[in-house]
Amino acid sequence: GENVEQHPSTLSVQEGDSAVIKCTYSDSASNYFPWYKQELGKRPQLIIDIRSNVGEKKDQRIAVTLNKTAKHFSLHITETQPEDSAVYFCAAGDSTLTFGKGTMLLVSP
Amino acid sequence: GAVVSQHPSRVICKSGTSVKIECRSLDFQATTMFWYRQFPKKSLMLMATSNEGSKATYEQGVEKDKFLINHASLTLSTLTVTSAHPEDSSFYICSASPRGTSVQETQYFGPGTRLLVL
């Protein structure tokens, strides 16, 4: 089955800095790679996703890149704000999703 | 739109009892719902795919007789933890999409149910 590794487990940045979270996956059949944000005590919410026929996708301050050859994909957040503080999960799959273990992002004012 | 609810939000039960958790799509029909388990400070682990009108598809390592899933209507899936034990204590969360049955459609998660088995 699919195995997703996510790094780092925690990430502390200053407001305005960029944050990068990286994931690797093992199953070459995976073709869908979403990212979720989960604030403390709340449900996960999709923030951006990318499919295998695309190498990069951007939505305002958030971007995701995918390297299918190397089987890794990354989340980039620019101009971070305190409200970006949350746990971020990557996932990979086709008909089902396997999640990474999450990255706790802390943005200090 | 696209609201998914869960009930109860939290439940405490004695070891050996069964607990039913409901997942409802409030403003759309969901022929497919996904059930996850989330351990503290850990990731979401897919337990099973709930299919309306047919049997659920369980992930490897998940006991079908332990975690009973019933998807009796287009807006309701239930997860019953049978003969619960302390190791079943966890956060259970469901997801569904108004756009179709594929997990590649934007998933909307329920608020989750925190189960504590004493």
Image (cartoon, helix red, strand yellow):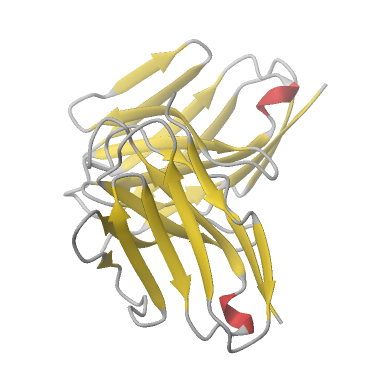
Which residue, as the protein is rendered here, is positioned at the far bottom? B16
Q: Is residue B66 left or right of residue B58?
A: right
Extreme residue toward the front, this view? B73
Closer-to-camera residue (B64/B28):
B28
B26 in relation to A2, above or below: above
Out of A94 and B76, give the one closest to the viewer.
B76
- The number of callouts visible is 0
Residue B77, image x, y percentages: 38, 55
Residue A54 percent location from the top left of the image: 23, 24
Which quadrant of the figure contains the C terminus of chain B? bottom right
Residue A87 on image: x %, y %: 62, 41
Left or right of B78? Residue B21 is: right
Which percent across, then down, holds residue A76?
50, 25
Q: Nearer the viewer, residue A12 or A62?
A: A62
In the rendered structure, the answer to whether residue B90 lies left or right of residue B59 reads: right
Image position of A46 (left or right of B38): left
Image point (67%, 66%), residue name? B11
Q: Extreme top residue here?
A: A60
* Image quarter hosting the N terminus of chain B: top left
In which quadrant of the rendered view does residue B31 lie? top left
Q: Residue at x 28, y 33 (%)?
A: B105
Residue at figure coordinates x 53%, y 79% from the top left = B18
Asked if B17 appears above or below A17 in the picture, the reply is below
In the rendered image, the vertical position of residue B58 relative to residue A91, given as above or below: below
